[in-house]
Amino acid sequence: MGKITDITLQSKNIERVNLFVDGKFYAGVSRIAVYNHKLAIGQEVDEKTLDKVIFDSDKDKAFDYALTYIARYTPTAKILKNKLYEKGYGKLVVDYTVDKCKKYGYINDEEYARSYVALNSKVKGKNRLRAELKAKGIEDAIIEKAVEGLRQGASCKEVAAKHSKNADIHDPKYKAKLVRFLQYRGYEWEDISQALATLKIVDEDFND
């Protein structure tokens, strides 16, 4: 429990005020939220009430920001959460906003994963795709569903052929470099070995 010691208008936005509790700045909230919750200087308030005030104050603004961001980019749920946190919104508001965006279909991690794989699978292997989707906050089950059935033998061969176009494929150092490059791209060993065979790069060192 604490006491509201001051409520001051914000200099850059007269629709919002600074809320002070026990002499310390607590949060910036909308004037209408203060009015709706009948907050006043000298009033005793608990943390639950203050959290509700902040939630009511910021939820619409956060949702508007989310829609603006989604109109410019195609984020995953995690990316959108991080952007909202960066804007200073609290967990209750962030969770509410992301859930609302999911409900309306504005963000969809499954669709994002499918699209990402379709767009990048010609130049990146499964392992690379998995890692990048994981970094974007996609759940493992969704990732595996997105890459399920993906055949990359042909794309691995194309990438290898392009990389080796002006190279001496019989140079052992180049062979090692090519393998590292394909592994970096995330191709699995089965696809890499087939690509090497297609280029007639056959070496016991690459078949262990």
Image (cartoon, rainbow, N blue to C red):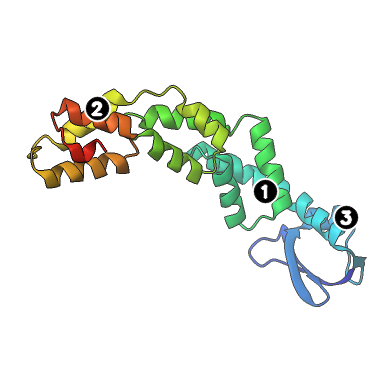
Number of marks drawn: 3
Foreground disc of the pair 2, 1: 2
**Residue visible at 74% across and 59% down?**
29
Q: Nearer the viewer, residue 197 or 15?
A: 197
Judged from the image, the secondary structure of the residue bearing numbered disc 1 is helix
Q: Residue 188: percent from the left, percent from the top?
A: 34, 34
* Residue at horizontal 89 percent and vertical 66 percent from the top: 40
Mark nearest the camera among 3 and 2 is: 2
Q: Which residue, given by chain and number where applicable, does mark 3 sit on? A: 37
Q: From what the image shows, is residue 50 above or below residue 93?
A: below
Whole-angstrom CA distance, mark 3 to mark 1, is 21 Å
For residue 25, say whether it is visible.
Answer: yes
Q: Secondary structure at mark 2?
A: helix
Q: Residue furthest bottom?
A: 23
Residue position marked by numbered label 1 in the rendering: 94
Comes first in the chain, label 3 or label 2: 3
Residue located beneath label 2 in the image: 194
The Cα atoms of the two marked residues, 3 and 2, are separated by: 68 Å
Q: Nearer the viewer, mark 3 or mark 1?
A: 1
Residues under numbered marks 3 and 2 in contact, where contact means CB atoms less than 8 Å apart? no
Sequence-wise, the earlier of marks 2 and 1 is 1
